[in-house]
Image: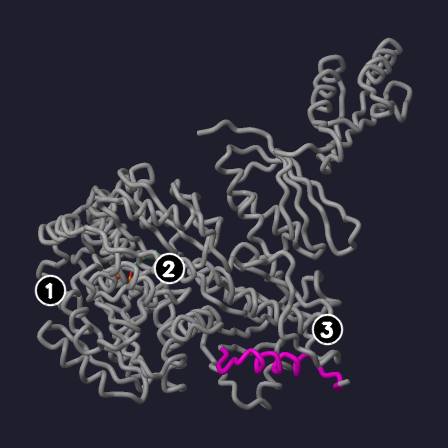
């Protein structure tokens, strides 16, 4: 069996009641390994776009695409694994129980990860700071493991990846 | 501009424009307006079943006998939930059907109102499409979509949920001729390159075999299949759902393959070097152990649903196409092949282990009943329930051109048979309908006798009474040391309920009990002469009779239990 890999799909779907349930229901009914799913509207009010990340081998991934394509409410399936894309995920991380040394360290980490405003400390308390990050899923993973290794109390809220086809370059 | 009309009027108008002549319905609070409209309508026969599950099976039988999209109408809540098993059955056997459910008024949805259920949500994974009409102006479009989606591509059930207030809201009288559905493009072409590749592979085979499934029937490609196989001299095996797509008197037809397939057919699948499969999804009942399925063969798979291809069986040449479109092309290419040796090998296998049952210890031999049916009802549509009797019917009943074999293949729903037989008889009164059923499954929907009597539906019910849940008992007999837990339907003292003769009498239904194989043909002839309603023929069958050959689930097709 081929290797399990993370893969991404973008879906254009009818913006109707129940479509999200139908798409996510497919993943549970067929035991596909859904990692993240985000959904929002597009330039057309009646069309939504989903970005889905799954962990699957080649054969299962082909099946997933076909099954999605077969749904009446799915307008278009785009395999993001094979094309240049831009992809970002929102991440909030609260680090608590900090003394002043810890706070300084948190600010340093934010600075190191920042790429032109993609990571910042957006809120601060007596013994806590809040990170706000817009990085790739992988970069967010790295940041999270660093925070967990450096600090005791870390709360994580992730939004799931959102992706769009690249105009000129690849970024993943 | 035409005058605006109520939703209930539009409902009936839509049915008329779709050419619906029959609907299967059961009333309730949330559809009283629609049924009142039906009262005022002529030209649509409304069949009142006695249970909503049965309604759906009746609709399935109707669709299978006519090829038309069947229509079901039920109320909200329990009416809707009762249809679920039927909808699942229709989904797995690709039966075109539109189910209309009543729903509580829009402003009550989500309130846990009386008889409110989220039927669209509950049936999402067993319908091609399911929607609640939330706006009267969408009603026409959604109804059109339902009929369009149900009947095209890989057909299947569509559910339209109509809140009570929508039924009386006034709006546009328009019912569109066609709806453009941007996410739905059933395959209407075939990739010629792929098809030629498939053809070349087949042409160069030494031991080619065609495996035909229910998709061939759905696309109406029976004639093309016969022509193709005959021109090329290639033997044909079928799935249970494909039974009948090849006339069984053709010398190239070698019977069903799969769990209870013929010895020669399963051998042929195992030994062939090219397997040309068309209109089947390679269900596990057909393949046995997937790793060892057709181990020597390169596999071509033609199917309308690309999602069915390379899902269960890894395929060498995939062809996404409607069976008829593909076969029409293939017939043009077809040239005779030298398959005499291969055909005689198959014939040899057949003579080594022909399909035949040993004499039963007690009662009537199931094979004799099936052969009686072949004799007396060689023009009938055959409907079955689920169990041993179903497999015997699939083995021993021989279909001629035009005869349908209507059975629950994908879901294997006990209780399917009797209502489906009624639906088939309603849909196509030209052909007699013979039901082959077991005493277990028959009891799951035998309330429909009232429907049969009131509507005077002439079906011949062949009840194989072995007083057991035979198919499960067979597994206990073979694999569980004869520990017959909850498969004996009789009481401890041996008494059996109900007495089917008295039961039938209660309905005023003509009934006969047959205990001797010598009386089979006479009984069937008597039943045939009676045309004014159902006839019950109760055949007493031994609980020890087995369906053989049998491939145990999960083992290779070549490992057949033969005795
Ligand atoms: C609704 C449903 N429940 C349970 C089963 C499992 N099952 C399959 S065959 C069978 C026995 C059927 O017995 P009967 O109708 O008497 O037919 P026979 O096998 O004896 O011919 C059972 C219980 C099923 N297929 N469907």
Q: Give the Cα distance between marks 3 and 1.
A: 62 Å
Q: Secondary structure at mark 2?
A: helix
Q: Is residue B493 visible?
A: yes
Chain of the residue that carries numbered disc 2 in the rendered image? B
Query: Residue B409, position in %: x, y?
Result: 36, 59
Decide which of tag 3 and tag 2 comes sooner along the chain: 3
Horizontal relation, residue B458 to residue B308: left or right:
left
Which residue is located at x 36 percent, y 87 percent? B456
Residue that label 1 marks: B362
Query: Residue B245, position in %: x, y?
Result: 31, 64
Segment tinted magenta in the rendering: B2-23
Q: Secondary structure at mark 1?
A: loop
Q: Secondary structure at mark 3?
A: helix
Horizontal relation, residue B236 to residue A37: left or right:
left
Task: Give the quarter the ligand 1 occupies.
Answer: bottom left
Chain of the residue that carries numbered disc 1 in the rendered image? B
């Amino acid at each position: 069996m081929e290797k399990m890999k993370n893969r991404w799909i973008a879906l254009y779907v009818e913006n109707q009641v129940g479509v999200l349930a139908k798409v996510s229901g497919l993943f549970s009914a067929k035991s596909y390994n859904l990692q993240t799913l985000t959904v929002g509207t597009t330039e057309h009010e009646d069309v939504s776009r989903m970005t889905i990340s799954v962990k699957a081998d080649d054969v299962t991934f082909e099946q997933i695409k076909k099954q999605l394509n077969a749904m009446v409410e799915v307008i278009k399936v785009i395999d993001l694994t094979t094309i240049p894309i831009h992809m970002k995920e929102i991440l909030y991380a609260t680090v608590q129980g900090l003394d002043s040394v810890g706070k300084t360290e948190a600010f340093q980490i934010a600075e190191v990860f920042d790429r032109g405003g993609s990571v910042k400390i957006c809120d601060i308390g007596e013994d806590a700071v809040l990170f706000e990050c817009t990085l790739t899923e992988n970069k967010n993973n790295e940041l999270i493991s660093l925070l967990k290794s450096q600090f005791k109390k870390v709360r994580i809220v992730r939004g799931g990846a959102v992706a769009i086809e690249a105009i000129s370059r690849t970024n993943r | 501009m035409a005058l605006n009309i109520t939703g209930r009027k539009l409902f009936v108008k839509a049915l008329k424009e779709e050419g619906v002549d029959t609907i299967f319905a059961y009333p309730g609070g949330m559809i009283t307006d629609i049924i009142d409209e039906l009262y005022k309508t002529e030209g649509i026969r409304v069949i009142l079943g006695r249970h909503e599950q049965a309604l759906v099976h009746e609709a399935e039988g109707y669709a299978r006998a006519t090829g038309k999209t069947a229509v079901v109408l039920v109320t909200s809540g329990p009416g809707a939930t009762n249809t679920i098993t039927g909808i699942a059955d229709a989904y797995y056997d690709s039966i075109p059907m539109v189910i209309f459910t009543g729903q509580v008024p829009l402003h009550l949805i989500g309130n846990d109102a009386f008889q409110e259920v989220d039927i669209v949500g509950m049936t999402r994974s067993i319908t091609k499409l399911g929607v609640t009409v939330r706006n009267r102006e969408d009603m026409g479009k959604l109804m059109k979509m339902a009929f369009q989606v149900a009947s095209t591509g890989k057909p299947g059930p569509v559910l339209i949920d109509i809140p009570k207030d929508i039924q009386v809201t006034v709006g546009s009288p328009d019912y569109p001729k066609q709806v453009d559905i941007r996410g739905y493009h059933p395959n209407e072409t075939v990739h010629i390159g792929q098809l030629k590749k498939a053809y070349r592979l087949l042409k160069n085979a030494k031991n080619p075999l065609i495996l035909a499934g229910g998709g061939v029937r759905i696309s109406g490609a029976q004639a093309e299949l016969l022509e193709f196989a005959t021109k090329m001299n290639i033997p044909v095996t079928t799935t249970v759902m494909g039974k009948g797509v090849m006339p069984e008197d053709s010398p190239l037809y070698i019977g069903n393959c799969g769990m209870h397939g013929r010895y020669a057919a399963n051998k042929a699948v195992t030994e062939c070097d090219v397997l040309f499969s068309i209109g089947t999804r390679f269900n596990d009942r057909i393949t046995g152990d997937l790793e060892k399925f057709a181990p020597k063969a390169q596999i071509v798979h033609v199917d309308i649903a690309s999602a069915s291809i390379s899902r269960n069986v890894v395929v060498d040449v995939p062809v996404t196409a409607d069976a008829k479109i593909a076969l029409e092309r293939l017939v043009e290419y077809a040239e005779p092949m030298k398959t005499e040796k291969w055909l005689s090998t198959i014939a040899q296998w057949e003579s080594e282990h022909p399909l035949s049952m040993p004499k039963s210890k007690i009662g009537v031999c199931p094979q004799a009943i099936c052969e009686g049916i072949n004799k007396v009802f060689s023009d009938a549509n055959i409907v079955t329930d689920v169990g041993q009797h179903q497999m015997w019917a699939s083995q021993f009943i021989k279909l001629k051109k035009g005869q349908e074999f209507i059975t629950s293949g994908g879901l294997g729903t006990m209780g399917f048979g009797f209502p489906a037989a009624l639906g088939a008889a309603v849909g196509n009164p030209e052909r007699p309908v013979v039901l082959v059923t077991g005493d277990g499954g028959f009891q799951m929907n035998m309330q429909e006798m009232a429907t049969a009597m009131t509507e005077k539906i002439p079906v011949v019910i062949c009840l194989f009474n072995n007083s057991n849940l035979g198919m499960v008992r067979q597994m206990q007999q073979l694999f569980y040391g004869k520990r017959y837990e909850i498969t004996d339907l009789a009481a401890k003292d041996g008494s059996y309920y109900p007495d089917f003769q008295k039961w039938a009498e209660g309905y005023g239904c003509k009934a006969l009990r047959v205990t001797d194989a010598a009386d089979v043909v006479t009984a069937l002839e008597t039943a045939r002469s009676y045309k004014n309603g159902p006839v019950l023929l109760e055949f007493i069958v031994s609980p020890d009779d087995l369906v053989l050959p049998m491939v145990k689930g999960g083992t290779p097709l070549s490992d057949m239990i033969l005795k």
